[in-house]
Every structure is written in structure tokens, then in C-alpha cells.
Amino acid sequence: MTLKAGTLHAAESAQHKIDGFIVHDGVYPPSLTIKRHDHELASVCVVMAGGYHESFGRKERYVIPGTVIVHPAGEHHADRHEAVQTRILTIEIEAARLAALRPETRVFDDSWHRKDDVLAIFGARVGREMRRRDTVSALAIESLVLELVATVDHAHLAEVRGARWLLRVRDYLEANTDGVPSMDQLAAVADVHPVHVARAFRRTFGCSVGTYARRLQVARAVTLLQDGRESLSTIAHQIGFADQSHMSRMVRAHTGLTPGTWRRHDEA
């Protein structure tokens, strides 16, 4: 079964169409089973809550909050949802817009997924703009979607073309939640010179090592802010910011939202 453009299996879905993109903020009921199907349009999905098992071809993946999935047009897959409600932000890309993007990105040529809390922040911000719907929302949504697609493309290219030692450096940064390593430590992980790490990292991931580490720090802070169990000062100390004020500046600079807004995110 092929689902036409703008059609999903969500029980509830807010939809926004803008210049070649169809953006859905969809809620799926617990224990939902979706039989094998495909979609007319290519899409990128960001799982915001819940989780499910997905089979595609002869492969399977288990997705949890923070997972980003790329579905090429016509990819056959089937889903088995967990016994909890699942929320997914889905961005469908119309054929003409996809053709216009292709000189810059090839990520929609193949199925791909990655657990990436930094990318998930884009999904949360798009969902928030969809609920806000003021006079600037259309432009804000389009710019966030384009930034998300570009960031997904960088992550995808790193996976398929990046040197294995660069992926080790990235994975080390993501796994090291207790502190930020030095360039010498990262060079030791990669077994290359620190200058080479710095140059190759920026070329592959589209930002410096320091910027990537800061994005990870902010993403961890956002996760704890949305969890809502710790005070802002506790989160700032736990994540490694100088103080609460420093965390507030960094979170706003990298996400466009204050820590207090992220804490109230699910209520907005």
C-alpha cells in the first residue's frame, strides 16, 4: 500500500504545508501495528516520544526518542509500536523540492537512521513553531526544516564517507558525558595529529570540534530541562556549565529558546 502525500497513520496530526515541504506533528496510539507500506514522498522523521520497531527490507531498527530516520520515496517498511503513545515529527519533501535540494544533499537516496539529540532539538523547535502559528511561523518553520535537512546530510555523509577515525572521535565526544576531552585526547583516540583532527572534523561535520561539543552539551541540558525533575542550577552544574546564567545564554544561543521555555515545552 502506498500512502499519498500528506497521509500518515497518526491518530492525531497537525499539518503545515510550505514551499515543497509537508510537516506533520503526529501522535500515534500505544501498541499500534502498521502493516508493510511505502510513501509517495521521501521524508525525514524525528521521534519525539515513545518508540517502535521498524522492519525495512531485510533489516530492522528500534527507534527511541531522539532517533532521526530518513525514508526514501517508495521504501517499504512496517512498524510495531510500544505500549506507550508515540509522537513523531515527519517532514515530507515534494518531488520538485527534492530535485532542487539534490545538488546539495543525497541523504534521501537511501534509508538511514541515527540516534542524535542535537538533531532532535530541531524537531522540537519545528513542532513548537507549528503550535505557535504567528506571522513569522511559516518562515521560521521553513528555515528550521532546511537547517535540519542540511545537518542530517552532514551526519549521513560522515557515516558513509567519513574516515573511521573521525567517527571514533565523534562517538567519543558523544559518549563522554562527564567532561569535555582535550584535542590531544581526541587525537590519541584517532591516532592522528590534533591539527589534522581539527581540520578534518570541520570539513566532515560542518562545524568545529568545540562547536559540536557545545551542541552536545546544550542537547543534554534540553533533555534534562524537559524531564523537569531537576532545578535549573542543578542541571547547569551537572552538565558542566559555569553557572545557571551561562547555561541560559548557551541554550538560547543554540536553540533560540530559554531554559524556562524548554521546561514548559510540552505545555506549550
Image: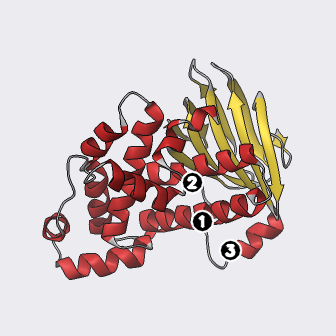
- At 35% from the left and 52% from the top, the residue drawn is 245
Disc marking residue 117: none
x and y, in percent, of residue 53 in the image? 55, 31
Q: Earlier in the sequence, mark 1 or mark 2?
A: 2
Q: Amino acid at mark 3?
A: Arg
Percent x, y of residue 106 = 61, 69
Of callouts 1 and 3, the N-terminal one: 3
Q: CA distance from mark 1 to mark 2?
A: 8 Å
Residue 116 in sight in this render: no
Tell me residue 138's x, y (percent): 77, 59
Question: Left or right: 32 with respect to 210?
Answer: right
Q: Check the image and report above or below for 63 versus 31.
A: below
Which of 8/224 is in front? 224
**Which residue shows up at 41% across the image and 74% down it?**
204
Residues at circles 1 and 3 in contact by the CB criterion of under 8 Å: no
The answer to which of marks 2 and 3 sits earlier in the sequence is 3
Q: Amino acid at mark 1?
A: Glu
Residue drawn at point x = 42 percent, y = 49 percent: 219
Q: Secondary structure at mark 1?
A: helix
* Mark toward the viewer: 2 or 3: 2
Residue linked to disc 1: 147
